[in-house]
Image: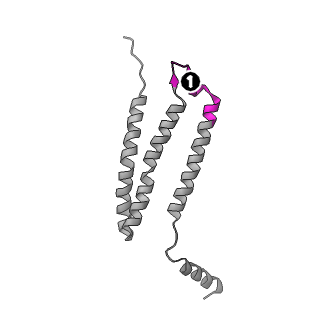
């Protein structure tokens, strides 16, 4: 009665989940964006924002595949990426750069711009002068 130990989640299951995420996230972002935009009367803007956030699914999939490639084990050549400090540092740099770029992009997307910037500056001038 020797129980065979297995992993709870194997690599094939994670790969499949990442594929599903890459396929479903843009569609889900599109739907949620359309619904949220319809509440504000800006459906196309909501669809655009939802689709932009939905593209995180394919980005995560690409980054997962990149990571898997970098830390792979190749028995033919004896390459083990997980054991190399250079691979770790390179992964950290790539993921940090992608995170910064996505953060800047989505920060601009979320912040948006006022529809009439001249009205906003006029109101701030009125409050400062006491009118």
> Considering the image in quadrants, where does the N terminus appear?
top left
Give the quarter of the image for residue 126: bottom right
Residue located 35% across and 67% down the image: 38
Q: Is residue 35 visible?
A: yes
Vertical side of 42 occupied by 72: above or below? above
> Considering the image in quadrants, where does the C terminus appear?
bottom right
- The boundaries of the magenta stretch are 73-89
Residue located 46% across and 49% down the image: 56
Location of residue 53 in the rendering, given as x and y in whole percent from the top left corner: 45, 54
Give the quarter of the image for residue 5: top left
Task: Tell me, yes or no, whether the highlighted magenta stretch contains residue 122.
Answer: no
Vertical side of 115 occupied by 88: above or below? above
Q: Is residue 9 visible?
A: no
Q: Crowding at label 1, few (<14), some or many (≥20) Cα neighbours within 10 Å?
A: some
Residue located 36% across and 52% down the image: 28
Vertical side of 5 occupied by 41: above or below? below
Q: Check the image and name the residue furthest to the front.
A: 77
Location of residue 85 in the rendering, given as x and y in whole percent from the top left corner: 64, 30
The local secondary structure at tag 1 comes to: strand
The residue indicated by pointer 1 is 80
Location of residue 54 in the rendering, given as x and y in whole percent from the top left corner: 42, 52
Front residue of 131 and 44: 44
Residue located 39% across and 15% down the image: 3
Location of residue 57 in the rendering, given as x and y in whole percent from the top left corner: 43, 47
């Amino acid at each position: 009665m020797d129980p065979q130990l297995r992993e709870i989640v194997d690599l094939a299951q994670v790969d499949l989940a990442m594929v599903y995420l890459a396929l479903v996230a843009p569609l889900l972002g599109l739907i949620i964006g359309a619904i949220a935009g319809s509440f504000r009367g800006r459906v196309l803007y909501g669809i655009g924002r939802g689709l932009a956030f939905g593209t995180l699914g394919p980005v995560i999939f690409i980054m997962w595949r990149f990571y898997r490639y970098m830390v792979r084990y190749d028995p033919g050549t004896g390459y083990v990426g997980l054991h190399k400090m250079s691979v770790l540092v390179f992964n950290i740099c790539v993921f940090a750069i992608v995170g910064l770029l996505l953060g800047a992009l989505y920060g601009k997307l979320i912040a948006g711009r006022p529809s009439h910037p001249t009205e906003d500056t006029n109101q701030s001038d009125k409050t400062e002068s006491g009118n």
